[in-house]
Image (tube, rainbow, N blue to C red):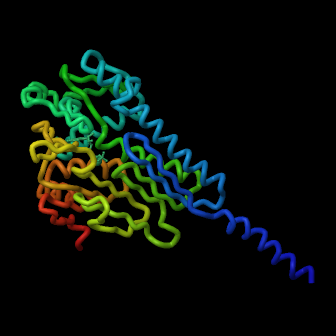
Amino acid sequence: MQGIVSPILLLWMLVYPRLSYATWFEDNQGIMGTNIHVELWSDSAQQGENAIQAVMDEMQRINQLMSPYIESSELSQLNSRGSDTAVPVSKELFELIALSVEIAKETDGAFDITFASVGYLYNYREHQKPEPQQIDNLLKAINYRHIKFDINDHSIYFAHPNVKIDLGGIAKGHAVDHAIDILKTLGIKHALVTAGGDTKLLGDRLGKPWMVGIRDPRNKDKQAVVLPLADTALSTSGDYERYFEQDGKRFHHILSPKTGTSVYEVQSVSIIGQRSTLNDALSTAVFVLGVQKGMDLLNRTPGYDGIIVDNQRKLHYSNALVK
Ligand code: ADP
Ligand code: MG
């Protein structure tokens, strides 16, 4: 009798604690000027809570490093001194800026972090924008070629007096990649991390795909497209994230580096690919490039696909998505 009961009891003892704790953990926090959303599956309350905390801590760390609004951030320090002297920065910031310059080259300057030389004069919340004269004066400072790198001491120098950089088009994607890497090292197998428009998925949603929506650019309660995804990432850039309207015109946060003003050919761009950092930058780049040049770029970039909602609300898909 005992010989039969004990193995069953043993099995029950092994399985029961798992059944009782295995569950979804979820949290939302406002960090990096946006909503950070984390969902993950864990079979222990301790592991689940630790994992959520680790993601939020990482978001805070990256914000402290890269925020243009925090005076002590490395990015702010570089912006305030980089035109006078070569400023040593952390390897992480150095590499992200170097990657941004690579992407600028690949996108014919559509993605250019020196857009901020003019971009810093916009304040969407306060409905402020630069005068045409101010834009004219600063436009020459927008050029990624002004950014000079010294790999030996990881220092950066701006070869023009008015250069400012901003990583708003790539830092959230970078943060989401980091967050998922951290979750992997903590033993998590199923998770979703979103920072504003940037989402990355670890595994699936327990045997089902994650359903990730691309919102209707003109109605936040409606989805334009819903995609079943697993083990990949998706970023959306839209003209609705930060903007104000004046004289019937929408002044939004994605700027043409050529003109220093908002671009109007499309309403949103979503990019699907493995690396959130690249999705983030590419969504901004394709937004600036518009439908034709944007799709050309995606169709020659292996592993990265896109969906554009143009200014007539028409959907466009890159080749690999319709094959
Ligand atoms: P968000 O997730 O905040 O909507 P996006 O990925 O859509 O971010 O990128 C928009 C942000 O990118 C802007 O808020 C600004 O910080 C930055 N940005 C705007 N225009 C450009 C550009 N031409 N090149 C690089 N970054 C840009
Ligand atoms: Mg982006």
Q: Residue 34: percent from the left, percent from the top? A: 38, 45
In the rendered structure, the answer to whether residue 53 lies left or right of residue 271 reads: right
In the rendered structure, the answer to whether residue 109 lies left or right of residue 227 reads: left
Residue 161, can we see it? yes
- Tell me which residue sits at (21%, 48%) in the image: 285
Q: Where is residue 170, by image quadrant?
A: top left
User: Who is closer to the viewer here, 244 or 4?
Assistant: 244
Q: Where is residue 272, by image quadrant?
A: bottom left
- Tell me which residue sits at (42%, 29%) in the image: 90
User: Who is closer to the viewer here, 106 or 136?
Assistant: 136
| Residue at the limit of the structure toward the bottom, as seen here | 1
User: Who is closer to the viewer here, 127 or 266?
Assistant: 127
Quadrant containing ligand 1 reads top left
Q: Residue 298: percent from the left, percent from the top? A: 21, 57
Where's the N terminus, which quadrant?
bottom right
| Residue at the limit of the structure toward the top, as seen here | 84
| Residue at the limit of the structure toward the right, as seen here | 1
- Tell me which residue sits at (21%, 66%) in the image: 317
In the rendered structure, the answer to whether residue 221 lies left or right of residue 207 reads: left
- Depicted 303 relative to depicted 118: above or below: below
User: Who is closer to the viewer here, 200 or 264?
Assistant: 264
- Tell me which residue sits at (16%, 63%) in the image: 313
Residue 110, can we see it? no
Q: Residue 268: percent from the left, percent from the top? A: 22, 56
Where's the C terminus, which quadrant?
bottom left
Task: Give the total of numbered labels.
Answer: 0
- Depicted 37 relative to depicted 14: above or below: above
In the rendered structure, the answer to whether residue 203 lies left or right of residue 136 reads: right
- Depicted 97 relative to depicted 197: above or below: above
Q: Residue 257: percent from the left, percent from the top? A: 15, 38
